[in-house]
Image (tube, rainbow, N blue to C red):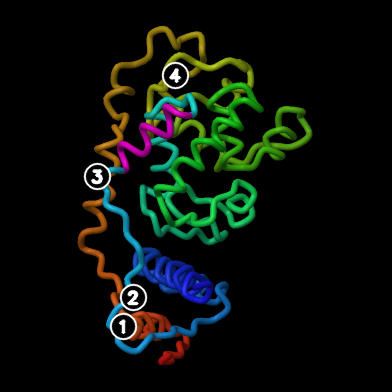
Amino acid sequence: MAARAALAWLWKVALAAIVVGASCGSAMAQQRVAEAGGLVVTARAGDSSFDAPTAPMAPWAQVIAQAAQDNGLPPAFLTRLLNQESTMFTLAVSRAGAMGIAQFMPGTAAARGLDDPFDPFKAIPAAARYLADLRRQFGNLGLAAAAYNAGAGRVSAWLRGSSDLPAETRDYVLRITGFSAEDWAANRADATAITAAVPAKPPITSFATAASPRATAAAITPTVPRATSRAEAGRKGAKKPTAEAELCASVAAGGRSCILQTAY
């Protein structure tokens, strides 16, 4: 059973590399396979396929809403953060090695008790719990988002004035909340509303104007069903391997070696 579980995990890592490589270039796929330490696929006699587990999209909206409610988070905030992390793609793997819909790094996943970052029904609640902890630590949603992206230590150092906040993190916070990281730092209490998802320009320049946010900002806020259905539509045309031999063929096509062995 342990060997089977390990193989299942390796399959998901390898499959994620292949799917990501198809959309982002073969170099990323090769990198992920290499990081997995090579690939040896074991097929059991009589097994015609070994599909990676895939979760239906429809329940995700309920999972996000429930996870947000359980942890005192606005559902729109959690939705936008997940959309920013992975565009709701459960097999996403970043160049840095972050995995799954919530893009957990291996060390963070282990520390948070998450055994399968590729399972959205585990990763989404884990992400919500993590964000709730970060919110308690830093005082508001914006700084929690910053810490989720850059790390709690980096945000703490930035607040002390001993380190800068990466441009990527600044953009990340603005895209998710509609407020700048500086506004969140200057106001260590939660704003009453999250008003923009991916604004071309900051819809709100400071908390002083939060009482009358621009109506256009709310209009571009993705709802949970819209974000998940968009992710599903984007994946419908993607072909994934359904058997061990096809997995090896896909890896080989990307320039990596793969050994297919049969166990009886």
Residue visible at 25% across and 69% down in the picture: 239
**Location of mark 3 (residue):** 58
Which of 51/230 is in front?
51
Q: Position of residue 18 (x, y in %)?
A: 39, 71
**Placement of 117 over or under 214, stated as above or below:** below
Q: Does the magenta stretch include residue 123?
A: no
- Whichever of callouts 4 and 2 sits on the residue coming sooner in the sequence is 2
- Whichever of callouts 3 and 2 sits on the residue coming sooner in the sequence is 2
**Location of mark 4 (residue):** 204
Closer to the eye: label 1 or 4: 1
**Placement of 71 over or under 88, stated as above or below:** above
- Whichever of callouts 1 and 4 sits on the residue coming sooner in the sequence is 1
Residue visible at 61% across and 37% down in the picture: 147
**Location of mark 2 (residue):** 50
* Residue 156 falls left or right of residue 83: right
- Whichever of callouts 1 and 3 sits on the residue coming sooner in the sequence is 1
**Location of mark 1 (residue):** 47
Q: What whole-number distance in Å separates the C-alpha atoms at marks 2 and 1?
A: 7 Å
Q: What whole-number distance in Å separates the C-alpha atoms at marks 4 and 3?
A: 33 Å
Q: Where is residue 85 in the image (x, y as percent from the top left)?
A: 45, 46
Closer to the eye: label 4 or 3: 3
Residue extent of the magenta highlight: 60-70
Closer to the eye: label 1 or 3: 1
- Secondary structure found at label 4: loop
Disc 4 marks which amino acid?
Ile
